[in-house]
Image (tube, rainbow, N blue to C red):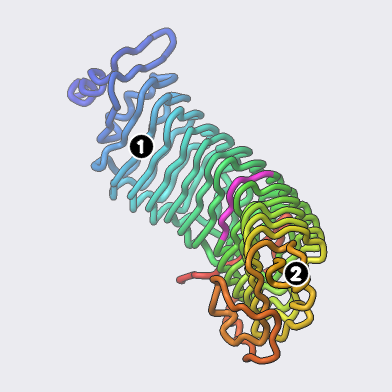
Amino acid sequence: MLAKILLPTLVAIGSVSAQSGVCTFTSTQTYHSQAEATALANCKSVKGSIVIASDAQPNIDITGPSEITGDLSLLSNNLIETFKSDNLAKIGGNFEIRNVTKLGALRFPKLTEVSALEWFTLNNLDTLEMALSKAVNITISDTFLQKLDGIDVTSINKFDINNNRRLTKFSTKLGNVSDTLTISSNGLLLQVDLPNLIWIKDMQIANVTKFSAPSLATVNNSAKFDFNYFTEFLAPNLTSSGVVSFIGNPSLTNLSFPLLQTVSRDLSIANNTALKKITGFPELEQVSGAVLLRGTFDEADFPAIQDVKGAFDVASSANITASCDKFKPLAPANQGGNGLIQGVFSCEGLKAEATDDTGSGGSGSGSNTGGGKKDSGAAGLAVNTVLFGVAALGVAQFLL
């Protein structure tokens, strides 16, 4: 009987070195049961990839190798409840788990390094034990986790955390992101703490109640904070960014970038219905794209601005005649200004539809007619003050 269990496994192993304990697979090794997986117990390391089959159940333990050079995959299994290894420390390829709906616990306490971690649709996963400190890409989507304490990488290419509806805490030593950090549609009370983050290429954050990155100095491409419920956004150390976008944050009352000097693409601040003043950019000198301001604000000012290469489009439902009068002298020469703004200039107040339009708008340069402001629509949500460079964001499109 034992021979029947072990023979298929032994055949699939190309070679086993008794002295080194290295097990080499000539092809991807698939395990259908715990009895088959016990063949790994004598392997100190595995050269190759391992798949846990869709009919494996209910608990799979692959304790044995400390390293798998290829991938470790668990796919489309609605039977497994626990997946573990007591000593696996490194996965050279992907650690992929998809559509495993009964999995409640992942226990890999020694795992510190993977190439990519890809977890999707793990609806029952509420227990995570890892010590992950190194990865190239991480995606965690649609789990039942409340926190990600076992993931503490310092440098990464892409990091995507989405649709984890019970997730309330994420803290990591992450220092730089060479591509994109995306956090969206997670738990209503999610708090994100990135105390060491200094440099990032792209950042897209939504649906969190607190986001703190006090050391952040540079955003290479885009910083998008759209559809949130934070009340304050402070970026004390950010000096340069590509896109800067704040759209649809109905509880935002204070926006401050005291050191920001250059925006290499567009600056968009729109439909933040509680924001009454856009005056938190005292050092901003250059915007290489367009400036778009929309909302119910009664004051806007960029006192240090020297160059806007795109359009400068401002509209508010409040009276902003004084602000428009400050901006008019910067308009293109063909609109009577000094040309610091190179694109089309538009500034209009008392515009009833100002919060409905985030595209290019009217042609006015100040107005003495128009409608009132709209309700913020933020009732019923607990709002936290947040920091981005001391920043923080909150939850916008959220379904309980």
Of residues 280 and 366, the one drawn nearer to the viewer in this rendering: 366
Query: Is 116 placed above or below 17 here?
Result: below
Say which element carries label 2. Answer: loop
Contact check, label 2 and label 1, Cβ < 8 Å = no
Q: What percent of the width, then of the height, locates residue 118? A: 43, 43
User: Can residue 378 be seen here?
Assistant: no
Characterize the local packing of mark 2: few (<14), some (14-19) or many (20 or more) Cα atoms within 10 angstroms.
some
Tell me the chief SS of the magenta region: strand
**Residue range of the region highlighted in magenta in the rendering:** 199-205
Instruction: Tell which circle, 2 or 1, labels the residue nearer the N-terminal end.
Output: 1
Judge the density around disc 1: few (<14), some (14-19), many (≥20) Cα neighbours within 10 Å. some
Looking at the picture, how far across and down is residue 399, in whole percent?
A: 45, 71
Q: Which x, y percent locates residue 58?
A: 31, 44
Q: Is residue 374 magenta?
A: no
Q: Is residue 174 left or right of residue 27?
A: right
Residue under the image location 62 percent in, 55 percent down: 265
Residue on which the image places disc 2: 337
Q: Amino acid at mark 1?
A: Ser
Q: Nearer the viewer, mark 2 or mark 1?
A: 2
Asked if residue 105 is positioned above or below residue 277 in the image, the reply reads: above
Please tell me whether mark 1 sits on a helix, a strand or a loop: strand
